[in-house]
Structure formats: structure tokens, C-alpha cells
Image (cartoon, rainbow, N blue to C red):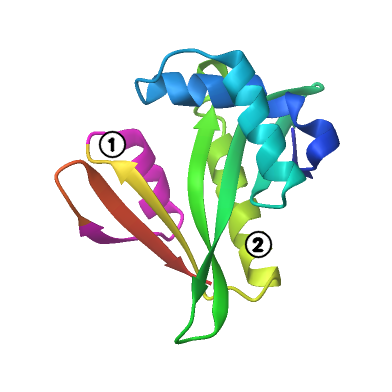
Amino acid sequence: MEIKQINVADYLLVTRLFNQYRIFYKQPSDMALAETFIKNRLENNESVIFAAIDHGEAVGFTQLYPLFSSVKATKNWLLNDLFVDADHRKQGIGEALLKAAAGFAKTHGATFLQLETAVDNYTAQSLYEATGFVKQDANTTSFYYRKAI
């Protein structure tokens, strides 16, 4: 398995997974929307996407969006999406994607990587905490995590 940062030429690698991610969060399946959304984010340099590639097929991805701090004058990153295909879970792919995201953020001068997950997504919470993310805050539907870089 290889983790690679994709560019606009590779956007179709992750659209099936992005569609599955949206379905996981109770959205209707819509491959056309998934393709357009991912392609637009990459074309407009609005996100950074890492894909886990196994035998030429994407089996997981994470998508990062920039966060800016005026007070600290830094650019940090929101890890907005993390998804691993159900048939490839429990193989360290999520952890590898998180490490790639943290490495990217550190290389680009970030002071933290932040994410949000559903309060009932226990598997994700365990993964985040095992990889150094610290729970910051909660509301009735989400927990927020942050990892210092």
C-alpha cells in the first residue's frame, strides 16, 4: 500500500470513496456530485487530498482544508474527511493517512491539525486518540480533536 497526495489529474481515484463517505453520513449516493466536488476542490487549490492506494485502487482517503489564525499568523489544517473502504479496515490505513496528513501540515508550517467526528463514531475516536489527537470540545452531535504539530 502507498499513501500519495493526489492532484486534479487523479481526482477519479477517490470519488467512489468520497461518495461512500457521504453515504456513511446519511447523504444520498450521487457519483456525479462526488466527482464534481472533488475535482473542483483540487482545481481551485481549496483542499489537499491523500489517497491510500492498494494494487492501483484507492482504498482510503483524507481531505484537508486550510484554517488560518490571524493572531498566530499561521496556516493550520482541518482534517475534514477520513474514510477507509469497509473491506480494508483494521489494516492501519486510517493511521497511515493521519500520519501523512500530520506530516504534510508540519512540513507546511502548521501548528495544529484539527478534526471533528460524530459522538457515536467510537472507532474513529479510538483511532484519533491513539494517534495523538486530543479531544477539545463537544456539542450534542460532535467531538472536536486537535493534534499539536
Span of residues in magenta: 120-137
The residue that appears at 85% across and 34% down in the rendered structure is: 9
The residue that appears at 70% across and 70% down in the rendered structure is: 107
- Is residue 33 visible in the rendered image? The answer is yes
Q: As shown in the figure, which amino acid type bears the numbered disc 1?
A: Tyr
The residue that appears at 53% across and 76% down in the rendered structure is: 111
Reply above or below: 133 against 15. below
Which quarter of the figure has residue 51?
Answer: top right
Reply above or below: 26 against 114. above
Percent coordinates x, y for residue 108 in the rendering: 69, 71
Horizontally, residue 134 falls left or right of residue 113, namely left
Front residue of this view, candidates 88 and 83: 83
Secondary structure of the residue carrying tag 2 is: helix
Question: How many residues crowd around disc 1 within 10 Å: few (fewer than 14), some, or many (20 or more)?
Answer: few
Front residue of this view, candidates 114 and 125: 114
In the picture of the structure, the residue carrying the numbered disc 2 is 103
The number of numbered badges drawn on the structure is 2
Reply above or below: 46 against 149. above
The residue that appears at 39% across and 63% down in the rendered structure is: 146
Quadrant housing the N terminus: top right
Specify which label sits upstream in the sequence, 2 or 1: 2
Secondary structure of the residue carrying tag 1 is: helix
Q: As shown in the figure, which amino acid type bears the numbered disc 2?
A: Gly
In the picture of the structure, the residue carrying the numbered disc 1 is 122
Front residue of this view, candidates 64 and 130: 64
Percent coordinates x, y for residue 95 in the rendering: 54, 44
Percent coordinates x, y for residue 141 in the rendering: 20, 41
